[in-house]
Each structure stands twice: as structure tokens, then as C-alpha cells.
Amino acid sequence: MNAGQLRLQVCQGDIIRIEYASGASLPMKTSLSVDATWGMPSFCVADSGGIGTVTTARLKAKVALATGLVTFTDLADDVLLSEKRTMAEGSR
């Protein structure tokens, strides 16, 4: 992303951790709320039409590569959670 760094970490099939920093790198911080050691979950990464998609056995995380907006969907692409665009980014 032009304005910073975005990282998606697949923790489990239904848990994806998102980190964002406006600088050139993400700080190495320990979470204050989650103290878990995650295994190696299976997932796929794809890029199509300006959308990066991480797919697990339970859900998808879609990132608009131009803006960094993240949307979570089920495997049938029904939206579960989506970030709201700001007025500067336009409306849908």
C-alpha cells in the first residue's frame, strides 16, 4: 500500500489477524489481548481485479489493493464484515 503496510495473518480457519502501520514497516509488538501459539492453518492467496483474497476453510478476507479496505465474507462471498469507506474515498 502506498500509505503504509498491511499484514494479514491466518491464525485458524476462522481467525485472521490484521495489522496496519502507516510507516515503511510494521512494528514487532506482542498482542496484549491474545496469548496463543497458532499452528499452520491451510489457506490460499489470490489476486484478481485489484482485490487480494486470502481464503481459509471457513472464510475469505478480501483486500482492495488500492485502498487497503478489508472485507470478510463466507465461502459463498456473502459479506460478514466490511470496513466503511470514507468520504474522501467515495461511496458505494
Image (spheres, helix red, strand yellow):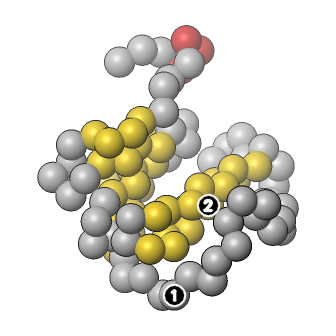
Residue extending farthest bottom: 40
Residue 25, above or below 38: above
Where does residue 63 sit, x and y in percent of width and height?
45, 48
- Depth check: give the residue in front, 43 or 3: 43
Q: Residue at x 50, y 38 (%)?
A: 69
Where does residue 90 sit, x and y in percent of width and height?
47, 15
Q: Earlier in the sequence, mark 1 or mark 2?
A: 2
Q: Quadrant of residue 12?
A: bottom left
Res. 61 mark: none
Q: Residue at x 56, y 18 (%)?
A: 86
- Depth check: give the residue in front, 91 or 38: 38
Q: Mark 1 falls on what kind of element?
A: loop
- Depth check: give the residue in front, 49 or 21: 21
Label 1 packing within 10 angstroms: few (<14), some (14-19), many (20+): few
Q: Residue at x 81, y 55 (%)?
A: 24
Say what amino acid the circle numbered 1 marks.
Gly
Q: How many marks?
A: 2
Q: Residue at x 39, y 39 (%)?
A: 81
Kindly indicate whether the residue at mark 2 contacts the one at mark 1 (C-beta within 8 angstroms).
no
**How far apart are labels 1 and 2 at the CA level?**
18 Å
Residue extending farthest left: 76
Residue 62, above or below 13: above
- Is residue 26 visible in the rendered structure shown here? yes
Left or right: 47 with respect to 84? left
Where does residue 35 sit, x and y in percent of width and height?
70, 73
User: Considering the image in quadrants, where does the C terminus appear?
Assistant: top left
Q: Mark 2 falls on what kind of element?
A: strand
Say what amino acid the circle numbered 2 marks.
Arg
Res. 7 mark: 2
Q: Quadrant of residue 55?
A: bottom left
Label 2 packing within 10 angstroms: few (<14), some (14-19), many (20+): few
The residue where tag 1 is placed is 39
